[in-house]
Amino acid sequence: MAEFVDIPSPGWPLEFGEPGRPGIVIVHDDYGRLPYLEAYAKSLANQGFFVAVPDLFDGRATIQAAGAAELAARLDPGFALAALDDAVALVRGHGATRVGLIGLGLGGRLALRLAQSGAADAVVAYYATLGDDEAGIIPCPVLVHRAGADDDRAESLAVDEFVSRLKEHGTPVTQHRYAAAHEGFANATMLELLDKNAAALAFARSTYFLQAQLLD
């Protein structure tokens, strides 16, 4: 049976950094808003950003693959996108004139979908793409982090096709592949998924990308 844990401030974004600074909304993966995201957000705040980390699972998180699958299956995409739109509005309401999105796994797909609406000025997607049925123009720069160890031929082609579609639509896109890393490599709470070297490099690349897109 899947097990879940309750998290602080259920259903409400955690906030880090100085309000009014360029903003970032971090969108958690299938496991929920686990503690590592607070460290991630604080590190971004130290780089000059105001960061919000919403909770899409109504106060629940898990450290089990079965629990993650159950939480993801329960999530209503319309609700999730509305919650993320509210988080972006919250950040802009604090005075941010530019807002970026960072999404991991499930959160990466949601961040990419929200970016199609023009809500963001930049988006970073960890091990996430959009399929043909979700095709649409993303009118802001995109950074994609690929988990190379999971790149079988079908997966590799899907990512390549997604990146090609972005380029065809005129979206500036950068991608990085981490050859030895599996999906979830940035989830520092899940030690069996974590690849410290890949996570550190992806964080540095994400920070540089967002500084270039959001900071004056």
Image (cartoon, rainbow, N blue to C red):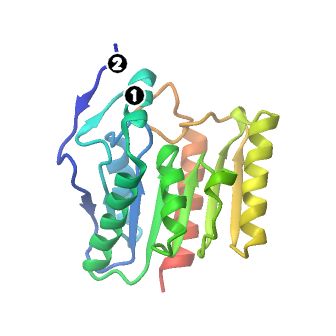
Q: In this view, does 61 lie above or below 169?
A: above
Residue shown at 34% from the left, 18% from the top: 2
For the N terminus, give its image quadrant: top left
Judged from the image, the secondary structure of the residue bearing numbered disc 1 is helix
Which of label 2 and label 1 is nearer to you? 1
Horizontal and vertical percent position of residue 11: 22, 50
* Disc 2 to disc 1: CB gap under 8 Å: yes
108 or 148, which lies in front?
A: 108
What element does badge 2 sit on?
loop
Q: Position of residue 182 (x, y in %)?
A: 62, 33
Residue matched to label 1: 70
- Crowd tier of the residue under label 2, counting other residues whose Cα lies within 10 Å: few below 14, some 14–19, many 20 or above: few
- Amino acid at dot 1: Glu
Report the residue at 30% width, 20% height from top: 3
Query: Is residue 182 placed above or below 132 in the rendered structure?
Result: above
Relative to residue 214, is residue 26 depicted above or below? above
Position in image of residue 82 (x %, y %) = 35, 61
Looking at this view, is 195 or 171 the one in front? 171
- Quarter-of-image position of residue 42: bottom left
Graded by Cα atoms within 10 Å as few (under 14), some (14 to 19) or many (20 or more), the crowding at tag 1 reads some
Residue at left 37%, top 26%?
63
Measure the alpha-carbon separation of dots 2 and 1. Answer: 8 Å
Residue 209 at x, y percent in the picture? 58, 68
Q: Is residue 173 left or right of residue 22?
A: right
Q: Which mark is residue 2?
A: 2
